Amino acid sequence: MVKVVALTGVDPCAARTPSLQGDGDTVGGRFVNVARRYAERPAIVAGDRSYQYGAISVAAQQVAAYLQRQPGFGVGARVALVAPNGPEYLAAFYGASLAGGVVVPLPERIDAPLLRQVLADAGAAWTLTDGRGADRLGAALAAATEELNVGGPAPADVAPAVPTGGLTNRPALLLYTSGSTGRPKGVLLSHGNLLSNAESILGYLPIRPGDRALALLPFCHAYGNSVLQTHALCGATLVVAGSATFPNTIVDALDQYEVNSMAGVPELYAGLLRCSDLGVRKLRHLRYMTVAGAAMPPSAALEVAARIAPAEFFVMYGQTEATARLAYLPASELRRRPASIGRAIPGVELQIRDEAGVIVGVGETGELCARGGNIMLGYWRDEAATDAVLKEGWLHTGDLARVDEDGFIYVVGRSRDQVKIRGLKVSPQAIAEALSRRLRDCQIAVAPFQWRGSARLALFAASSRRGPQLLHEIQRACAESLQRHERPAYIEMMERLPLTASLKIDRYALACRAEQRLSELEAQGEPAAFTEEAA
């Protein structure tokens, strides 16, 4: 039976400086140590309220003490966390970690059936949320809810018993990722993974104590979690403001809160380029932006860099299985190599290997493999899947890549996402990138789907332009830029592309839509927006 616990009463200011000494080899312990040093500095700003590190630390300690009083709780117990970015999320995350639990973060608006499925798979007996989410979660899980007031100074008798020693390689985080199938898969990360990833990023990004970072990405996903850890573990401030749905609110937030940095995915930047005055308004405090989560068209990366100059733009690459980050492209190299993901981050080794496991030469294509302290422990309760990607300490990413003579890496496709059309391998990502170079005012997504027993491709385009002229341009670009077997069987123009909770293009939803729309059009006897390939 799952218990839903609603955190309430987080104080903006600490009534006293936290005195607890944490284990520096754990995420929760590292956070409370940072909070002792920067007790009066804001850890997070949400709307018009600012919450000090000391106050978040006191709240986290009360969460930890509460969990340790629960029957059945112990080191390694899974604790779900369903809450939006905010002070309650930080208190719950670091509190559960401080107590020795394994945090299972989930999207705030997760569907009830998927929530029940994931909690059952994870074996989570507690679900932490904020005051607004308690009733909804309680109803979804048919569970009783309990309120935990974490405001005010923590009484001495609720101080948590901090687990110490030997926890570096113990599980700390269970991140569920749906991939392209829609089926959740748990990625198990250790305290060491999280700290190694944060320390590597702090080694190449110019993050400083006291910086303000705009936290648009959900903390419950790998990229957003990475933003959380790198900033919270060095004394920086996270600002929760702006909306990906309304891009100009992001520019407003950058200006209003005097933000120094922002992390985003390509879809978020596509919205900023199309529907905001980024580059028109002078953002005096902005020093850099970063992009990761998916491949970004080089032309879009160059345009963002030009609009925010003299602030810098960093292109990065990673996977959930690597905690978040594997490579980055120095901002100074962007103009010379806009299609590159750069080189390995500090503490990570990258190799490109052929199917026999031999390292390929310059310019040759192979699978990108990685080794480092940030590589996952494995997939939760899935030994076969773990063995398929973790081999002799190396993570086989499934991404196809090549390296140039200067050691810069270029991802050219994803082996697991390739499909066979007419017996020939096709990369939907490569097709989308080729068309994006021709149709620069369109956001392009290509999704494989099944139609009449065969694999086909569907193309979706989001643009401020609509109508027959745009469709004609898309069809012409397909005919001139793609081989016959690469051309999509279905084309649809949309106002905006659907996004997952982590703000990535939802290709699974697009594939389902293509199948559904073709079936409907066929039943109605109406022609679909076919190219000549499907005729």
Image (tube, helix red, strand yellow):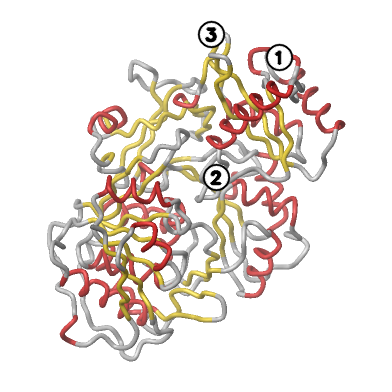
Q: Nearer the viewer, residue 392 or 419?
A: 419
- Looking at the picture, how far across and down is residue 485, in whole percent? 64, 13
Q: Of the numbered discs in the image, which one, if any, rests on residue 423?
A: 3
Q: Which residue is mark 1?
A: 533
Residue 36 in sight: no
- Name the quarter where the N terminus is drawn: bottom left
Which residue: 55% across, 40% down? 506
Sooner in the amino-acid sequence: mark 2 or mark 1: 2
Q: Residue at x 19, y 80 (%)?
A: 159
In the displayed structure, does residue 474 sit left or right of residue 34? right
For image coordinates 34% across by 84% down, the residue present is: 151
Residue with the mark numbered 2: 504
Q: Amino acid at mark 1?
A: Glu
> Relative to 371, is 288 above or below?
below
The image quarter containing residue 87 is bottom left
Mark 2 and mark 1: span between their CA atoms? 28 Å
N-terminal-most mark, 1 or 3: 3
- Across and down, in percent, residue 197 comes to 36, 52
* Left or right, 372 with reference to 419: left
Query: Residue at left 20%, top 62%?
Result: 100
